[in-house]
Image (tube, grey):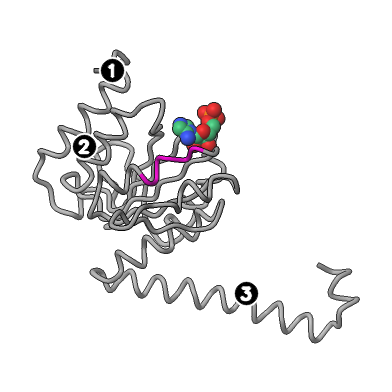
Amino acid sequence: MTRSADVRDLIDLFEAEATRDRPGSETPDVGIVMGSDSDLETMYGAYEALTELGFEEVTDYDDPPESRFSFETFVVSAHRTPELMYAYSETARDRGLDVIIAGAGGKSADLPNMTASIAYPIPVIGVPVQEKSVDSVIGMPTGAPLVAVDAGKSFNAALSAVQILSRAHPELTDRLDTYHDELQDGVGAVSRRLHELGTERFRETR
Ligand code: AIR
């Protein structure tokens, strides 16, 4: 048993949350975990995508945000805090999470795979924080699934998470459609400008 008071507190918090009977509208839908706070810049893309799609961050389980869809964020290290990883993942379903985004870096990026195994059948989207983490994130044995994005693509991980949620929540499909329309508008506007200005002028004014 860990002697770290903060880790112990977090484990107690997860276990207590798991025993509460609360509607899905009051619990986080998406969990974001990362192996270290040094991963935060890379994992920030997930935050950006979720907030762009109208999700709010839960920072106090007793005071959930107004918006229907929300997410939570924690540092959980597979190697430095294995008990915390176990408690986070094992309680995920009872705490109301529907999908988890897990990022880790280094050559032993085990958080996504272990989270996927323990939180099963909740889908886990793994984010290799560095190129050298890709093999360790995607190399799951048959029967132990993990969805993964390419190195650093945490923004896409969050879009995938919302795609998964949208199958049960049509309003999220609308938000994803709007996001995609805006993406197309952006490319369309650039394409038109490039064509109309010509390559040299476009490069000068870019
Ligand atoms: N890591 C942390 N615990 C287990 C692993 N694999 C990863 C983090 C981070 C890297 O190790 O996900 O990408 C370096 O962490 P730190 O804290 O030394 O910067």
Q: Nearer the viewer, residue 73 or 60?
A: 73
Q: Dot 2, crowdedness within 10 Å: few (<14), some or many (≥20)?
A: few
User: Within 8 Å of ligand 1, the CB of disc 1?
Assistant: no
Residue type, label 1:
Thr
Question: Where is residue 176 shown, x and y percent of the image?
Answer: 41, 71
Side of 67 relative to 203 (left or right):
left
Residue lying at 23% horizontally and 69% vertically, measured from the top left: 168
The amino acid type, in three-letter code, at marker 3 is: Gly
Residue labelled 3 has its Cβ within 8 Å of some atom of ligand 1: no
Query: In front: mark 1 or mark 2?
Result: 1
Residue, disc 2: 62
Q: Nearer the viewer, residue 111 or 167?
A: 111
The residue stretch that appears in magenta: 108-113
Residue labelled with disc 3: 186
Relative to the observer, which residue lies in front, 52 or 75? 75
SS class, disc 2: loop
